[in-house]
Amino acid sequence: MKNLLSLEALTASEMRSILDRVVAFKSARTSHARPLAGQTWALIFSKSSTRTRVSFEVGLRELGADVLFLNANDIQLGRGEPIRDTARVLGRMIHGAVIRTFAQKDVEDFAQFSGIPTINALTDDEHPCQILTDIFTYEEKTGLKIEGKVVTFVGDAACNVPASWIFAAAKLGFELRLAAPRAYWPSPDILKRAGAGDAADWTQHPGSVTERMTVGVGTIELLTDLNLAARKADLLYTDVWVSMGKEDEAKQRIEALGGYQINGELVKLAKPGVAVMHCLPAYRGKEIDDTTFEAHADLIFTQAENRLHTQKAIVDWMVAK
Ligand code: CP
Ligand code: NVA
């Protein structure tokens, strides 16, 4: 039985095995096999969601399942019932679970104690379904593999979305540049888990606050200099400055991250025809300006649509015999 709890736990060939299935699901949409016929899957969400919720509800139905949406606050979990007990109950009644919550350990405990296929639909640590979708979307748009490309992430580089990008870079092999103030760089622990050496081994670039390191078969650059990060990038990517659960830090985050924005000037520094992507929801005037967002809206909303097709591929990969 397979789970999808993190990109950290996936191999490159497992990622490719998922990505290779997406085209078939996108082109056939409703005329493909229904491997979940007769099953019931549950979505258990402790945080808000538009894309992830709708794409999983629709996708699981198109794969043949009945779907329950459980707001964590409406079940006893929200009143303190342990995740392990919730998992042991649901594991006896349903066939698979999709969980959006805070602690990564809760998703891992759910998988262990339920014994049913479990998907991480975003935790504080990772957003694996998003980044698999993003890679599919980049490759679909350009017709090129992401291997060897330059992906520049702008904004809060310490949150879940860039963490999943880090593990993808390490496994698949591309250059990931993370442009953020130092306080919003990813933790040394994540970099180490992705395969980086100790900080002392990282290369400090002269004349700028930059660290460069090898992770697995990829490269990570941490930069405070946004313009340097964007230079000749193949993909410019951003996410919100204030992630879910960080609302009480909103004021300090908006001050600290001010300027770490994708805008017309930044796009000019990247490769001509650069892909501009955003996992959404977008806050115009913060991590991206309105003109740039609208100029790239077709790709950004294709990216959102591709959540549906990619997640169907993920589930198909998980339940395949
Ligand atoms: N990108 C993403 O996960 O969107 P939602 O929070 O709307 O699910
Ligand atoms: N980093 C964001 C992603 C939203 C899809 C958050 O956790 O809120």
Image: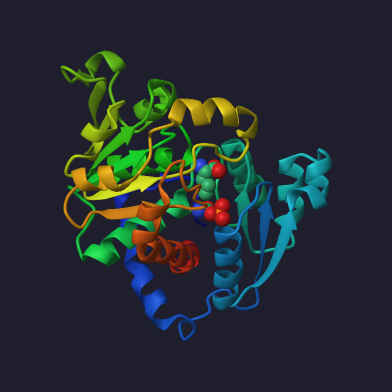
Q: Quadrant of ligand 1?
A: bottom right
The answer to which of 118 and 214 lies nearer the viewer is: 214
Q: Position of residue 120 (x, y in %)?
A: 55, 49
Q: Position of residue 132 (x, y in %)?
A: 39, 55
The answer to which of 203 and 34 lies nearer the viewer is: 203
Q: Which residue is at 48% across, 39% downward?
A: 160
Q: Position of residue 293 (x, y in %)?
A: 39, 55
- Asked whether, in this view, residue 154 is left or right of residue 248, the answer is left
Q: Which residue is at 61% across, 54% downward?
A: 49
- Asked whether, in this view, residue 209 is left or right of residue 79, the answer is left
The answer to which of 179 and 252 lies nearer the viewer is: 252
Asked whether residue 182 is in view, the answer is: yes
Of all residues, the one furthest to the top in this rendering is 200
Q: Is residue 142 above or below residue 222?
A: below
Q: Which residue is at 33% across, 56% downward?
A: 135
Q: Is residue 66 above or below residue 229?
A: below
Q: Is residue 271 above or below residue 65?
A: above
The answer to which of 309 and 88 lies nearer the viewer is: 309
